[in-house]
Image (spheres, grey):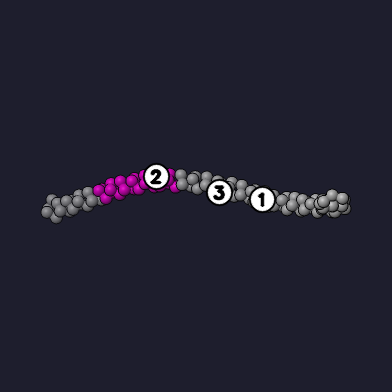
Amino acid sequence: MRDGVVISHKEMFEAQQEVVKSLHRLESRMESRMDVLESKVEASIRADERSRKALEKAEGAMKAAKEARRVADGNREIITRLLVAVMTGLIGGAIAALFYFAQLGLGG
């Protein structure tokens, strides 16, 4: 007999079976973790799509708000001009009425 360790066929078979079992457990854990990772990636993709849609809607709302602001500023300018015209007319009419009543009062 030579120096060294003698391993029987039975011991080698049992060790091999343990390695196979360990590999199966490892493969099973990896598959379950891959499933979890895939579901998280899918959820992340859905969240990204929702955030892109929200960003597009926000940009559209911003454009609409800017347009509304531009229209409101234009309307404000028109209203200001109308008020100036009306006030000028009223003041002019009041002055004309004063002159008219002044002439009547003076005998005129």
Observer able to see residue 13: no
Place of residue 54 in the rendered image (x, y in percent of width and height, measured from the top left): 54, 48
State how far apart marks 3 and 1 are (Cα): 21 Å
Q: Which residue is mark 2?
A: 70
Name the kind of residue labelled 2 in the image: Arg
Q: Which residue is mark 3?
A: 51
- Which residue: 27% across, 50% down? 87
Whether the magenta-drawn stretch holds residue 88 is answered as yes
Place of residue 95 in the rendered image (x, y in percent of width and height, measured from the top left): 19, 51
| View extreme (left): residue | 106
Q: Tag 3, which secondary structure? A: helix
Q: Earlier in the sequence, mark 2 or mark 3?
A: 3
Q: Tag 2, which secondary structure? A: helix
- Which residue: 77% across, 50% down? 23
The stretch in magenta equals 65-89
State how far apart marks 2 and 3 are (Cα): 28 Å
Along the horizontal axis of the image, is 55 left or right of 35?
Answer: left
Name the kind of residue labelled 1 in the image: Leu
> Which callout, 2 or 3, points to the residue nearer the camera?
3
State how far apart marks 1 and 2 are (Cα): 49 Å
- Which residue: 71% across, 51% down? 30
Q: Which residue is mark 1?
A: 37
Place of residue 48 in the rendered image (x, y in percent of width and height, measured from the top left): 58, 47
Along the horizontal axis of the image, is 44 left or right of 90?
Answer: right
> Which callout, 1 or 2, points to the residue nearer the camera?
1
